[in-house]
Image (cartoon, rainbow, N blue to C red):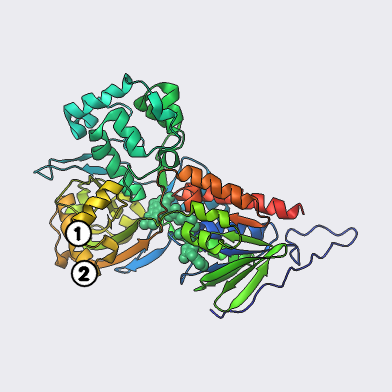
């Protein structure tokens, strides 16, 4: 796409003449905005500003928009390369989908749920359906039979102490990791065998790294209120809407990015891909954005990139952000296999498998059996052909990282060769699904790497987010959005971006 300056410098408003009907979108917009980053957050920001009459330019470094909500083609199938579902705990994503005319495409995943692979000499015997009554793997009832099966009688007895242990200092501590809270209340077995596999799958991270208040907002307050972690989990589960916790789109979540892109075109938003923004600076009451040898000026600037990029680009204008610069997120490699293997029609491990860290026979941290999870996909492959997605890589706790370094551990998953990851995925899928899969069964495969796309939510994250918000709020015409502030996941990103951008628009419209 050719690069050319697209925005007039501070366009003027054309005032409607006497008796004229106010136009829905001003012929000459009163305000202009540049959105940096074309992931879901940037797309939503651009759309909401354009709908309010702003002249908007969106600059995206990648070859296409969507960020983590993208697609790739494997064996002739268009598959999601990143996000493949959205949480239904709030109306944020369903409402957006409705506005884009996609409500009819919303689908529920197969209700059979996923499995949990625990360590054990007999891999098949050490697998069980994932207990579904918890929160991030934390059980609401540690004495339930499926929990006892997963953590053993001794582990369950320790976990049950949660009911009688005093709440103590945990609730009052300024910040704490998820691991710290679970270990203190329910012991190590719950942490390693139930919670770690779930957060490894969702956040590609270790519970000892994650800030409990960021990944489970309200949990510590609920512990203080109800007197135990299990009662807190039960109360939060009861408050969640009934039905499946996630939904998807027939055809894949990539349709959301495409629909947003189409809507931006209809709204007259300039979308430039392949443009990496190199600098942003204040210019009077507005902003100048530099990229690929050209500059754009605008009244408003929305930074919708990853955290480190946003902080670095704003370093000259909002230096206070430097102290809150997040660490790089974990690198993740996803290996997608499309296989012809009719034995998988029985969905031997439901919608997939979450893997405990100490399972030595398997390197993947999770496997999604996509054709078992999504009926629309099974319909498009037909019986006997299956889509499997295995994920590799998670952020380690400081202790685990030090141990890996001392042992001169092999390169991380993102640095491994494609062919190596492919061979590993075939081996892992065979073990996890208990169905032998060979190279001859594979009709297509692909490796997608996500580096830093899952933001780090390390301990203290909530406070760092608050510090960023305070610093950004003090700068007129600036908003910073995205998963690094809103929290990982489309529900969080959508709700937060819309609220933030509405605030920015109101601020400028009020001038
Ligand atoms: C593998 C994977 C699977 C996931 N699965 C799910 C799921 O099933 N359900 C769910 O709800 N969530 C899921 N998520 C999380 C969810 O996708 C993200 O939280 C969300 O999409 C983040 O959107 P964003 O706009 O904040 O960031 P991003 O999607 O990361 O977008 C940021 C954009 O900024 C661009 N950019 C960066 N620097 C510059 C620059 N200097 N100039 C211009 N552009 C720049 C990047 O190229 C990128 O496109 C998943 C994430 C990953 C990585």
Q: Assign a secondary structure to mark 2.
A: helix
Q: Nearer the viewer, mark 1 or mark 2?
A: 1
Percent of width and height locating residue 429? 19, 55
Q: Assign a secondary structure to mark 1.
A: loop
Percent of width and height locating residue 222? 44, 27
Disc 2 designates what residue?
419
Q: Is residue 85 left or right of residue 420?
A: right
Furthest residue toward right = 18
- Front in this rendered view, residue 99 or 269: 269
Q: Residues within 10 Å of mark 2 (few under 14, many from 20)?
A: few
- Front in this rendered view, residue 94 or 510: 510
What residue is rendered at 82% in x and 65% in y?
A: 14
Percent of width and height locating residue 378? 30, 56
What residue is rendered at 52% in x and 60% in y?
A: 310
Furthest residue toward left = 121
- Distance, label 1 to label 2, CA atoms, is 22 Å
Does the residue at mark 1 contact the one at mark 2 (Cβ under 8 Å)?
Answer: no
- Front in this rendered view, residue 319 or 344: 319
Q: Is residue 7 left or right of residue 142?
A: right
What residue is rendered at 25% in x and 63% in y?
A: 338
Residue 509 in sight in this render: yes
Percent of width and height locating residue 88? 46, 43
Q: Which of the 4 quarters of the picture holds residue 421? A: bottom left
Query: Split into 4 quadrants, where in the image is the C terminus?
Result: bottom right
Q: Quadrant of ligand 1?
A: bottom left
Furthest residue toward top = 164
**Looking at the image, is 270 positioned above or below residue 187?**
below
Q: Is residue 419 left or right of residue 6?
A: left
Disc 1 designates what residue?
408
**Looking at the image, is 246 positioned above or below residue 509?**
above
Q: Residues within 10 Å of mark 1 (few under 14, many from 20)?
A: few
């Amino acid at each position: 796409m050719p690069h050319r300056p697209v925005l007039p410098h501070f366009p003027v408003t054309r005032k409607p003449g006497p008796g004229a009907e106010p136009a829905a979108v001003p012929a000459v917009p009163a305000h202009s905005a540049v959105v940096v980053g074309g992931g879901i957050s940037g797309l939503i920001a651009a759309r909401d500003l354009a709908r309010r009459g702003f002249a908007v330019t969106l600059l995206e470094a990648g070859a296409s928009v969507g960020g983590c909500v993208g697609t790739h083609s494997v064996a002739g199938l268009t598959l999601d390369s990143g996000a493949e579902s959205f949480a239904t705990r709030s109306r944020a994503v369903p409402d957006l989908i409705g506005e884009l005319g996609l409500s009819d495409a919303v689908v529920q995943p197969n209700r059979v749920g996923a499995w949990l692979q625990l360590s054990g000499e007999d891999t098949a015997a050490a697998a069980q359906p994932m207990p579904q009554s918890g929160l991030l793997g934390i059980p609401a009832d540690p004495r339930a039979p499926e929990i006892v099966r997963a953590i053993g009688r001794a582990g369950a007895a320790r976990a049950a102490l949660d009911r009688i242990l005093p709440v103590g200092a945990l609730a009052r501590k300024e910040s704490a990791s998820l691991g710290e809270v679970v270990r203190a209340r329910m012991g190590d077995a719950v942490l390693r065998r139930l919670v770690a596999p779930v957060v490894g799958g969702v956040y590609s991270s270790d519970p000892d790294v994650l800030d409990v208040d960021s990944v489970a907002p309200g949990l510590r307050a609920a512990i203080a209120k109800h007197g135990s972690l299990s009662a807190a989990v039960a109360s939060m589960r009861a408050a969640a809407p009934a039905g499946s916790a996630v939904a998807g789109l027939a055809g894949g979540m990539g349709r959301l990015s495409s629909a947003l892109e189409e809507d931006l075109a209809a709204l007259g938003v300039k979308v430039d891909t392949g443009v990496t923004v190199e600098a942003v600076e204040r210019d009077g009451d507005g902003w100048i954005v530099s990229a690929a040898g050209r500059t754009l000026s605008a009244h408003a600037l929305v930074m919708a990139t990853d955290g480190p990029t946003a902080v670095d680009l704003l370093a000259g204008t909002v230096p206070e952000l430097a102290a809150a610069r997040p660490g790089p997120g974990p690198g993740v490699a996803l290996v997608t296999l499309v296989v012809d293997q009719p034995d998988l029609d029985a969905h031997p491990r439901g919608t997939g498998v979450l893997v405990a860290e100490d399972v030595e026979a398997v390197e993947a941290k999770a496997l999604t059996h996509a054709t078992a999870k999504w009926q629309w996909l099974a319909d498009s492959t037909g019986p006997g052909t299956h889509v499997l997605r295995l994920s590799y890589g998670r952020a380690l706790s400081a202790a685990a990282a030090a141990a890996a370094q001392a042992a001169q551990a092999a390169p991380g998953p993102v640095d491994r060769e494609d062919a190596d990851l492919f061979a590993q995925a075939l081996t892992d899928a065979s073990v996890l699904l208990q169905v032998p899969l060979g190279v001859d069964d594979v009709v297509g495969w692909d490796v997608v790497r996500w580096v830093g796309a899952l933001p780090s939510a390390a301990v203290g994250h909530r406070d760092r987010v608050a510090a960023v918000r305070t610093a950004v709020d003090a700068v007129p015409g600036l908003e910073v959005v995205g998963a690094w502030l809103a929290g990982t996941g489309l529900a969080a990103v959508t709700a937060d971006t819309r609220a933030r951008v509405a605030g920015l628009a109101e601020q400028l419209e009020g001038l």
